[in-house]
Amino acid sequence: MNNPTTSRPNDLPAVLKEIIEHKAEEVAQAKRRDSIASLSSKIKDASALRDFFAALVAEQSDPPKMRVIAEIKRQSPSAGLIRPDYEQDGFKPQLIAQQYSQAGASAISCLTDENFFGGSLTYINLIKETVDLPVIRKDFIIDEYQIHEARAYGADAVLLIAECLDDDQIRRFLDSANELGLAILLEVHSKANLTRVQPLIQGSTHKRVLLGINNRDLTRMITKLSHTTDLLDLVQNRSILVSESGIKTRNDIQELESNGVAITLIGEHLMRQPNPGNALQALIGNNG
């Protein structure tokens, strides 16, 4: 029987369960195509690591000025293709990354899931060849293989979603990422998982772990910015806190800043605009 404090994939809402089941098949195929030994060889030739953690966590003013992880995302299960011009060759992640960099982003989040989000691991190097910002692989990590894969394809950090992983997986994945030099963004959606993962972060030898609160309710698939502020009193180290999803206006940024939140991950709102970089500049104003 599952420990009630440990979320596992079979506890997930239907949409995430479908993604995780498909991801397991993908990983199995990838292992047959590219062994760990092969990935290790690619890692030796991978692009140099950039410090994702340091780019986001540093000395801050009072009140803090926002640092943004700007996301490159082509589509999603709920929204489909985010813009018609992202069809096929119309989607140019390197150009979007350039816009983000010029607008003042601190890091880039790159969706690499192909089936549900239209991403690709190959986008990571395209981005790193274009801008000097660190890049996080955003995907559904369920196997240590994917962490090696992320490094082999040039990622500087990886996302872990607490709702998809049990405690043992989180510990092992933190260790694997640490050994490879990758920073971690450990994301939670619920109060229960926030409480569950903080001791895992504190107990890890990995000291470059960010804690994300995703404002999307996975059961009802609605997003409320207040989810972050409602949980703030439970956050033990706010300097590593990232508020994710539902950030759409300058007022949203100011609300988070006034509550001591210094890092955000912003994606779909920016990607819906004709020029994502201009949209980012409008959000962060003079804070870039």
Image (tube, rainbow, N blue to C red):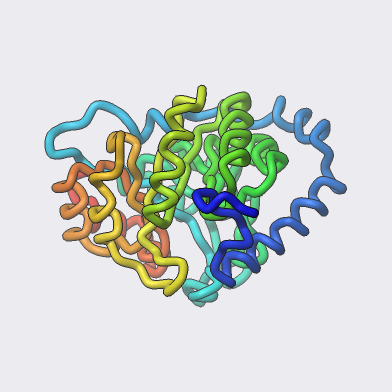
Between 97 and 55, the residue placed more toward the observer is 55
Q: Name the quadrant containing residue 255.
A: bottom left
Q: Is residue 45 above or below residue 29?
A: above
For the N terminus, give its image quadrant.
bottom right
User: Residue at 54% of width from left, 68% of height from top?
Assistant: 13
- Quarter holding the C terminus is top left
Which residue: 79% across, 49% down?
A: 30
One can see residue 28 in this view: yes
Counting from the top left corner in percent of width and height, residue 97 is at: 45, 50
- Horizontal relation, residue 65 to residue 217: left or right: left
x then y, percent, for residue 145: 72, 40
Whether residue 94 is visible: no
Seen at 45% across and 44% down, the residue is 196
**Image position of 21 (left or right of 164):** right
Give the farthest residue toward the front.
1
The one of 15 and 200 positioned closer to us in this rendering: 200
How far across and how far down the image is residue 103, in percent?
31, 48
